[in-house]
Amino acid sequence: MDIQSQIADLKTRLTEIEDLRSASAVLSWDRATYMPPGGAAARGRQSALLARLRQEKLNDPALGRLLDALQPHGESLPYDSAAAAMLRLARREYDRAQRVPPAFVAQLHQHLGESFAAWRQARPENNFALVRPYLEKTVELSRQYAAFFPEATHPADPFIEQFDYGLNTATVRAVFAELRQQLVPLVQALTAQPPADDSCLLQTFPMDQQWSIGLEASQLFGYDMNRGRQDQAPHPFMTSFSIGDVRITTRLRADVFSDAFYSTLHETGHALYEQGVAPELEGTPLAGGASAGMHESQSRLWENLVGRSRAFCEFFYPRLQHAFPAQLGTVPLDTFYRAINKVQRSLIRTDADEVTYNLHVIVRFDLELALLEGQLAVRDLPEAWRARYQSDLGVRAPSDSDGVLQDMHWFYSPVGGRFQGYTLGNMMSAQIFDAASRALPSLPADIQRGQFTGLRQWLTENVYRHGKKFTAAETLHRATGQPLQVAPYIRYLRQKYGELYAV
Amino acid sequence: MDIQSQIADLKTRLTEIEDLRSASAVLSWDRATYMPPGGAAARGRQSALLARLRQEKLNDPALGRLLDALQPHGESLPYDSAAAAMLRLARREYDRAQRVPPAFVAQLHQHLGESFAAWRQARPENNFALVRPYLEKTVELSRQYAAFFPEATHPADPFIEQFDYGLNTATVRAVFAELRQQLVPLVQALTAQPPADDSCLLQTFPMDQQWSIGLEASQLFGYDMNRGRQDQAPHPFMTSFSIGDVRITTRLRADVFSDAFYSTLHETGHALYEQGVAPELEGTPLAGGASAGMHESQSRLWENLVGRSRAFCEFFYPRLQHAFPAQLGTVPLDTFYRAINKVQRSLIRTDADEVTYNLHVIVRFDLELALLEGQLAVRDLPEAWRARYQSDLGVRAPSDSDGVLQDMHWFYSPVGGRFQGYTLGNMMSAQIFDAASRALPSLPADIQRGQFTGLRQWLTENVYRHGKKFTAAETLHRATGQPLQVAPYIRYLRQKYGELYAV
């Protein structure tokens, strides 16, 4: 076979793997949105089958032989060509799939299914004892998983590499330590001030208007509804079945307006990234976000750096008042702006504000490293959790339900790699927004006038269109001229919240 | 391997084949309901992949060896055991899959994709010349397909067997000839009378109420919304992803109330069948309707024999008047009942009333036999169509758009086997309803009181729970004590319409 036939063969194989992922994603989306309760059992079976078929295609030795044969060709191509990038990514994913025996994957999935069921029962019951044996086994299986990657210097490395390729435990730990050192005193200073009054958000907001005002903002940002849609789901998420079909969900709660609105902006950020991938990458494994952290940087950029900015409020708040005259008609802009940026010490990560959010994440990241290292036993985890919340956030959960049981992550996936992306995303969002601001001097004025095209085009040109062609670190460097930095994010927080809280 | 391990292996294989069908069905449902336009290209690719993977599993020689090994075991089991039925059905489907070479299947699908695209353009343009070469090739490929079944005595047999196993061209032709002989004079007699006044149906009906009143009737019939749901789609259909997830769609048109309402009852009939399959058949190929005709018998039974009966109107019409006070508040029950049962000579099959509908079907059935036999050339098809509509229905389409181009069937699937089920279903609906009426003396009174549980339970016990365990002919015989009969259906039509039209 000549090179072109081999490339064509490879593309066909990779598109099939990608299409099986997309088909699984359709089944998951349906389960989260419209599936009647009676469909659950068969759907679990059907999803597992598609996942297994995808895994079989990824494990096909013929794919390995093809990648071997094309290796010299890939290395001869310019680094930034799509074909070279596809070969690099396919090689990485194939090699990773080879490392872990299918029987181990099956055992892990079986265990995690049982663990998740136990967690669903344990959380409302505040029953850590119920999940403890499952989590102990999950930690053990996670360590075994890591052992399939003997070159890793830390058992969390294989997990961090899976979601944020290019980073490892040591680099993330160092960055997080620096960030934490600056965040803890900032949170102390902000929460020493009188708290913001957020009572204007805690009224009853008609759901229909919540729905349409969220979509209005989403489309202003540039979400293309010919290639997307929004539906309701218990937990907001973004999912993509192709570059032409990138969907978001939101959750409507009559008593918390900001829940639906800002989650719509958040998921819109994820969706703009996926919709902005270059069309020629469709059907290849390059069509998607560069990493978990880079994806999160875009959801947070649109949700927070744009959506919770004073400039955006100046433009959009009159529309919110028009949508909710009884609730917001007499509330001044400044009160609203303070309310949506209220900083407070809190127990629940997903409800946390921009400033404290990262402390929640770093607690989890540090604890999961300690679990994987064997420095912390699962039986001591609830107390370790409480101690860190006390020292970092100054709060103490009255129960494990609002403590160590609050997130599903450790109960439905291996321990490791799932949390760092949230905070890496926050950091990158500020660094990228900085670069965009330098390139677009009119950006603040544009946002104030409701003009988002320039920003979206800059992000598309510098980040979105590349998809997974480059690693997150490479993409970040190309977009900002710098490696990952803590400073821009801290500067952003200090400036915005220093002004808001007069510290 | 012992028998039990072989049975377990077989079940696993068949469940995978079934689950790939279900996953494809989820993708198709999504395409028809919620998919944004931009998703079409990738979705086509994804659906084709799942169809191919299903075909590969069905063609796996290991499946054939397993069926061979289990053949003696299957024959030793009682005929009506689920295991015996599963072996019979799997053998039939495996053998059928072996007959047609994969390359031919691929060529056929490729051609039909192009043919369907041509038809979508040709129908609004009234351009038969555009589709003619495609249809000529479809007829040729259909004949080639039939030739893979050399034991067939007619080229339509393999297609009829695929959808209505147990029947063949000769038997259907004989039954349809008898039916046509009785229907043509009945239609002549009925349409010689003054037409019913259906102006009460041709008003503007609020869509929300159309939606909810249809679902109200559907749930009265027993459609279980914990295992189903209704959504909007351009063409109403029922689809099933498991016994626990059986969905229907409907189409709302403000100006035609009866469109949504009776299509909801129709699809509800299909759904009751699938929801009524015995739970122990879940995940096996036996979970589904026995044949196209038997499936249609249940949609027509609930739509027509129940939904358009005087007894049902006596119960339900007050609710319709309550839902649409401005439209129906002053319309007498008798006027409404006549309107929904108006008999008229018409051009379009899907808009036809109960009596004339079967003449539309028989025209198509006879013409496709003539095409397959080579008795009729595609170039002469439009004229043959017009001639048969003139002789059987007394109408002449002003254009091919309302003539030979109206149905998509010949343009997206092989010619043959797709139409007979509609009329077989009508015939069986009356025969089955007769048997139910004999077993349930209170049935007319029950319907008048809005009590459908007895009928649904009788149908579940005698038809639904068996799924595909028996052929349609066997199921019919078990339920009614008789083979397929023309008489009950003609008797039903004569009685109902004789009374309505005083003939």
Image (spheres, coloured by chain):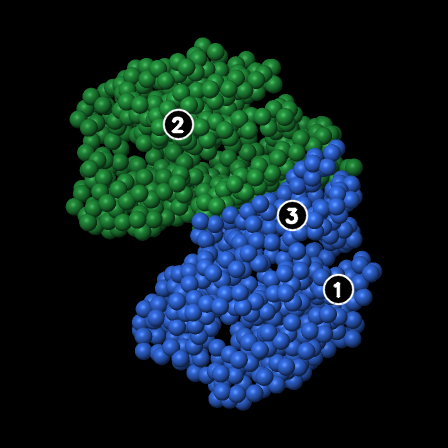
Chain colours: A green, B blue
Question: Disc 2 to disc 1, how far (Cα)?
Answer: 59 Å
CB atoms at circles 3 and 2 under 8 Å apart?
A: no
Question: Disc 1 to disc 3, how far (Cα)?
Answer: 27 Å
**Could you tell me residue B249's position as x and y percent?**
49, 58
SS under mark 1: helix
Amino acid type, callout 1: Asp
- Read off the residue under disc 2: A122
Residue placed farthest to the top in the image?
A375
Q: Is the residue marked by circle 1 packed among few (<14), some (14-19), or many (20+) residues within 10 Å? A: many
Q: Is the residue marked by circle 3 packed among few (<14), some (14-19), or many (20+) residues within 10 Å? A: some
Question: Disc 3 to disc 2, how far (Cα)?
Answer: 40 Å
Amino acid type, callout 2: Ala
Q: Quadrant of the C terminus of chain A?
A: top left
Amino acid type, callout 3: Ala
**Along the viewing direction, whichever of A321 and A109 lies nearer the viewer:** A109
Q: Earlier in the sequence, mark 1 or mark 3?
A: 3
The answer to whether residue B218 is left or right of residue A52 is left
Subunit that carries the residue with mark 1: B
Task: Identify the disc placed on residue B157.
Answer: 1
CB atoms at circles 2 and 1 under 8 Å apart?
A: no
Subunit that carries the residue with mark 3: B
Closer to the camera: disc 3 or disc 2?
3
The answer to whether residue A321 is left or right of residue B398 is left
